[in-house]
Structure formats: structure tokens, C-alpha cells
Amino acid sequence: MAGHSQFKNIMHRKGRQDAVRSKLFSKLSKEITVAAKHGGPDVDSNPRLRLAVQNAKSQSMPKDNIQRAINKSQGGDEADYEEIRYEGYGPGGVAVIVEALTDNRNRTASTVRSTFSKYGGNLGETGSVSFMFDRVGEVAYKPEAGDADTVLMAAIEAGADDVVSDGNGHVITCAFEALGEVASALERDLGEPESVNPVWKPQTSTDVDEEKAGTLMKLVDALDDDDDIQNVYSNFEISEEVMAKLTAA
């Protein structure tokens, strides 16, 4: 399992069980509230909020929940969330980027640091690994959106930079600054996407063996399960053979 498919299946929350759906909605709500607080509650004039709402809709978040998250930003009693990016190395020297929205910097830093240590990694300084990634926009569609040629033509028309299509669906990449426009154009041609996100895309990948892969996935899961953590990205690559063994375990 390589490239975008790995990230779509491991790093993102798509396809998680219903047991963690409330946690996902909580994180989506937090992003909507923060976006609305900083840029205003009008979706049309606030690009960040528009993206947050697009992504919430793609994850089947109810409209009432979305509106409640927007309204919360104007209430004056919501928590004052701070955006923080943590960078470090996991076992095997793979690079890891963690994005957080927190109302307690000390709590989150302590949790992230201890989680890295628990799974054989170490937290670094800001900028220690992000130079190995590109900040891009990513729009994902399920296979039902169309065949590879149809999606490719729609992506070209929308101004995207790249498309990867496989049995899991289609992942369309564009410039970070153009994500809102590209996502809107794609939605007109292909329908509502599975997700719309700014992401950290690794420039190169690091192959890992079964032992390190298992530990890395535990590290990512532990970080991702924390309420303060919004997104986790890494540059490790797992072969289909190793992934099959881990899945069967």
C-alpha cells in the first residue's frame, strides 16, 4: 500500500467505525467554530469556514451540528483555541507532523511529547520535518464519482495539479491557496466530495518493516484519538504484504 492510498486509509479518519464518529464530529465542529471566529460566520466570505463546512458535509455531519458550531463562534463563551503544529520523528526515523487546536498549550504539548516517547519517537522543533512535506490541497472522491478519465478531465478543468485513481477512489491534489476554488469546481462536475482538506504531502516516502509499521500505526492512532489533535501526517510507506499481515493480526 503506497502513496495517497496509504494516507487515505491510515492517516485520515475516513472509514472509521461509528464508535468514533462522535469524536470526528467534535473535531470538525471545533475547526468550524475556530474558522468562524477568526474569519466571520459568513461561509461565502470566509474561505477557511467554507472548507471546514465542505469537509463536515462530506463526512455526513448533520446541518444542525454545522450551524450550531458556527453559532458557537459568535457566543463569546467558547474556548479560546490555539493552533499549534508539532513535528518529530517516529520509530525508524520517519517524519511526523501533528496539527492541534487546543485551549491548553501545556496539556497538549505534554501529551504529544509523551505519546512520541511511548512509541519510540521523539518530538523535535517546529520546522524540523515540515521541510520534507509540501502544503497542498486534497479533494477525495469515492470510485462512484466516475472513471479515471472522467475525474482527470474534471480535475484539469478545475485547475488541479494531480490525480491519483485506484480501487479506493480518486485523490485530487491542488495548490493549497486554490483549494476552495478547485473543490467548488469539482463539486459542480462530480458532485459532493468525500473530503476536502489542506494536507501535508510528503516529498518522499520511507519504507518500514512489519515491526516498525505496527508501532507507527499505534503512534498515529494514539495521537489521532486525542481530542486536541486535529490531523496527523507522516511519510512512512507500508507494502501491501506488510499491511495484510497487520490487518489480519
Image (cartoon, grey):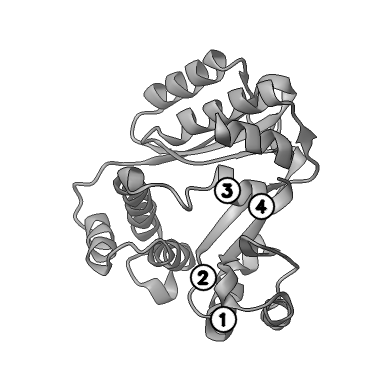
Which residue is at a point 53% across and 48% down the rendered structure image? 12
Disc 2 versus disc 4: nearer the observer? 4
Name the N-terminal-most of marks 2 and 4: 4
Circle 4: element type:
helix
Q: Is residue 175 left or right of residue 16?
A: right
Crowding at label 2, few (<14), some or many (≥20) Cα neighbours within 10 Å? Answer: many
What amino acid type is highlighted by mark number 3? Asn
Circle 3: element type:
helix
Name the N-terminal-most of marks 1 and 4: 4
Q: Position of residue 48 (x, y in %)?
A: 47, 62
Residue 193: assigned label: 2
Q: Is residue 106 left or right of residue 138?
A: left
Residue at numbered disc 1: 190
Residue 9: assigned label: 3
Pointer 2 and pointer 3: residues touching (CB < 8 Å)? no
Name the N-terminal-most of marks 2 and 3: 3
Per the model, the C-alpha gap separating discs 3 and 1 is: 22 Å
Name the N-terminal-most of marks 3 and 1: 3
- The quarter holding residue 63 reads bottom left
Question: How many numbered marks have been drawn onto this rendered protein structure?
Answer: 4
Identify the image quadrant of the C terminus. Answer: top right
Q: Is residue 246 left or right of residue 57?
A: right
* Residue furthest to the front: 248
**9 lies above or below 160:** above
Per the model, the C-alpha gap separating discs 3 and 4 is: 6 Å
